[in-house]
Image (cartoon, rainbow, N blue to C red):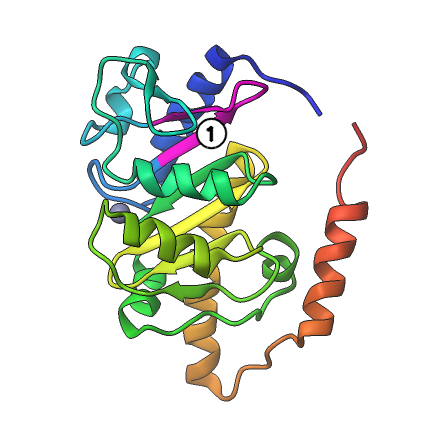
Amino acid sequence: MIIYSAGQLKEELIDTGKKLVDLRLVVATWGNISCRVPKTGHFIVTPSGMPYHELKPADLVTMGRDGDIVEGTRKPSSEVLMHQEIYKARPDIHAIVHTHSNFACSFAVAGSPIPPILEEMAQLIGGPVQVARYAPPGTRELAEHAVEALDQRNAALLANHGVVAAGRTLHEALTVAVLVEKCAQVFLGAKMLGTPHILSPQETHLLRENFLKYYGQKR
Ligand SMILES: [Zn+2]
């Protein structure tokens, strides 16, 4: 595994933010992104309400494990508590991308989970995308509900709000966010055509295990 410096991670985080807007996963300044800083227990998070295409490394905020600001002068994202609680609950997660993408929001509003319907979803997300119980934005309740809905998977929907996508890297978390939106769209389309075939828990488990063990290049 390559270890990136905090400076490199800040550049990648800003680049990820620009992609969120360019891929239309968020509009304006909505959504937020974070990543862990290796070996420190800290994480870097986007500031509250600043346009992604104007962000500079100095605008990012480095947070301590318990919510203290370690570095930065900006106010951190209003959802910083959700990022903090997910990192506490999931040592395997190193980056989080929160979006408000359209098709996924339809499921979040309907309170409908997205079942495992595509192999790539089983591989990267590890199962269904569940809907976290509603709580107002920025609250501890929302953070706790998000952790509960994620369980051991890499994505969840926030009721009447949006998507939480996670991964081992910023690139993987962004890919998960894109994939959740694709799966929401595909599931709606499949429902219009008939009865969608859902991958079984056994098929989903096998796809996830094989992905983690064998996919990609060894480093
Ligand atoms: Zn949001």
Q: Which residues are magenta?
A: 33-45
Q: Amino acid at mark 1?
A: Cys
Image quarter hosting the N terminus: top right
Instruction: List the residue tagged with mark 1.
Output: 35
Q: Quadrant of residue 123?
A: bottom right
Residue 176 against residue 195 in the figure, above or below: above
Residue 39 percent location from the top left of the image? 59, 19
Q: Is residue 61 magenta?
A: no
Residue 165 percent location from the top left of the image? 45, 48
- The residue sitting at 29% across, 74% down in the picture is 110
- The residue sitting at 78% across, 27% down in the picture is 219
Within 8 Å: ligand 1 and the Cβ of disc 1?
A: no
Main SS of residues in magenta: strand
Residue 215 percent location from the top left of the image? 76, 45
**Residue 7 in view:** yes
Query: Residue furthest toward the bottom?
Result: 194
Label 1 residue SS: strand
**Residue 180 in view:** no
Residue 142 against residue 98 in the figure, above or below: below
Q: Is residue 119 left or right of residue 193?
A: right
